[in-house]
Amino acid sequence: MATKVPSNLEIAQAHTLEPIADIAARYGLGPDDYDPYGKFKAKVDLSLLDRLAGTPDGKLVCVTAITPTKAGEGKTTTSVSLTQGLGKIGRRPVLCIREPSLGPVFGIKGGAAGGGYAQVVPMEDLNLHFTGDIHAIGAANNLLAAALEAHVLHGNKLGIDPLTIGWRRCLDVNDRALRQIVLGLGGRANGYPRESGFDITAASEVMAICAVAADLADLRRRLGAITVGYTYEGEPVVAEQLKVAGAMAVLLKEVLKPNLIQTLEGQGCFMHCGPFGNIAHGNSSLIAAKVGVKLGDIVITEGGFASDLGMEKFLHIVCRLGNLRPHAVVVVTTVRALKHHGDDPDGGLDAIERGSANLGRHIGIVKEFGLKPVVAVNRRPEDTDEECELTRRLALDYGAYRAELNEAYEKGGDGAVVLAEAVVDACEQPNEFDFLYALDAPIADKIEAIAKRVYRADGVHFLPAALEKIDRYTKDGLDTVPICMAKTHLSISHDPGLLNAPTGFTLPVRDLRAYTGAGWIVALCGDMQTMPGYGVSPAFHNVDIDEEGRTVGLF
């Protein structure tokens, strides 16, 4: 009978953390290389990249997963445990993951620190405000919105057509009531009434910019290039013209520095930026990855949700912008998730076999990019040896380079040693990594390439609003940037009801947004929303403070 594992919060609160200075020293960092945020967190100075410019890069591994289920697959747990397992076999790994948003922390998903004995810490801090990065991003975003409203009210010298203003406010809380709102009620002193809305901060363009900016000067340039609307003559208006980009950069200059924390077993982790993988590009910052490959011999980074989302965007957007080359991909799966995709969550081996088509599809997506997939079977206490072995064998049958159990939830790094060895092996093999579309291809062709080669759709249906944006963006010279697809994470398709490995569908693209500061175009698929809402029983119902002032109920 399996031993009961304490809750994630209990494990984290019982753990004795190492001073962040000791973690930094382990990677060759001195006091001038970082600014401590208390005893266990630090902001790493960007000058480190210049100092380490001549240091050879380590290997780069992206951790992704099969299509998520409500039960969760443990992608972050696997990322952390793989890092701990690499430490057990004598490597010097660095983990790069995203900062949690309060929206999902208090919603269904809960915390984003890993699980069991494969966590990054301090768990409470990183799940609740952390170093204030996300709040600063929201402040900068909303400063631009306020500057825009003030400009229109006070004479509108730029001739901005209010009906073309696309810049939305943001908030780091799930709030469906703010998806569509009316601004400016209460008379002329409060502005001109018009429709607008809020995005969750993780889906904002300012978050995207912070995640891909190369340095402070690049951050300042990208903020100035944000398109907020159009003039009556149809010319784009950018933040630079509103004279607000400099103030935004001042608010964000500390945000740009990666946050250094630690795993339960003392490996370094850069937890930085937090774009969602379904409605944004879903990856930790480019700066964190660039620092990571200089400090570690293997960098583990996580692409949000599954290979059709965060991994695809990591490869097409982040690797392109940062001139990074991945060496391997880890695809996380579980017995329970395969049963779910087999439409029988309580089923047996036959349900696993049926649901394994989803695993096979994700293995195929990784191979489509010319990379070697290593499948991690993230074992749960109730999984039998027979179920785990069947899952591992099916992964190999679908073409995985290696497939190994991950038992780190209960055993920490010791439970991920074999997986770590498999990843090292995959990294040493040659690969044929390549992109699935050329940047100079037409906008519609790039979207179709993702739809057909990643999702396996029969084609794409562009709604009128999307077609109008394709014409506008092409005329504006924005047809040479990558595409960021915003779609459901619950299916490889656009429809959350299509489980497993759907075929025979056409992908509807209802609208496009130009992220001219970040440097890509967002394609909104199906009815995907950029502001989530809370359900009937959100996670915050369980979060409280006990009589001793300790947090309880956070997971």
Image: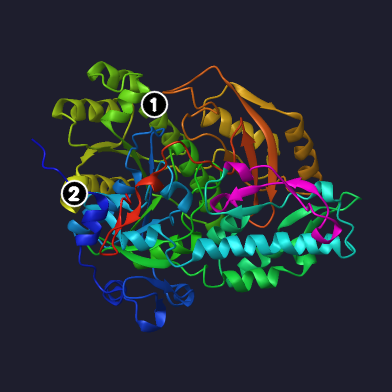
Task: Classify mark 1: helix, strand or loop.
Answer: helix
Regarding residue 56, the answer to whether it shows in the image is: no
Residue underneath mark 1 = 358
Residues 436 and 420: in front is: 420
Q: Determine crowd level at label 1: few under 14, some 14-19, many 20+ residues with C-alpha closer than 10 A.
A: many
Q: Where is residue 252 in the image (x, y as percent from the top left)?
A: 57, 69
Task: Classify mark 2: helix, strand or loop.
Answer: loop
Q: Residue 6 carries which label?
A: 2
Q: Residue at x 32, y 73 (%)?
A: 24
Determine the image quadrant of residue 247. Answer: bottom right
- Looking at the rendered structure, the kind of residue marked 1 is Asn
Q: Left or right: 491 with respect to 83? A: right
Q: Where is residue 359 in the image (x, y as percent from the top left)?
A: 36, 29
Regarding residue 69, the answer to whether it shows in the image is: yes
Coloring scheme used? rainbow
Q: Residue furthest bottom?
A: 32
Q: Position of residue 321 (x, y in %)?
A: 56, 55
Q: How many marks?
A: 2
Mark positioned earlier in the residue sequence (1 or 2)? 2
- Pair 1/2: label in front: 2
Examine the structure image and report whether residue 197 is included in the region drawn in magenta: yes
Q: Left or right: 246 with respect to 380? A: right
Tell me: residue 217, above or below residue 351: below
Q: Residue at x 83, y 61 (%)?
A: 189
Span colored in magenta = 176-204
Cα separation between marks 1 and 2: 31 Å
Q: Where is residue 523 in the image (x, y as percent from the top left)?
A: 64, 39
Determine the image quadrant of residue 216. Answer: bottom right
Determine the image quadrant of residue 340. Answer: top left
Residues 231 and 295: in front is: 231
- Looking at the rendered structure, the kind of residue marked 2 is Pro
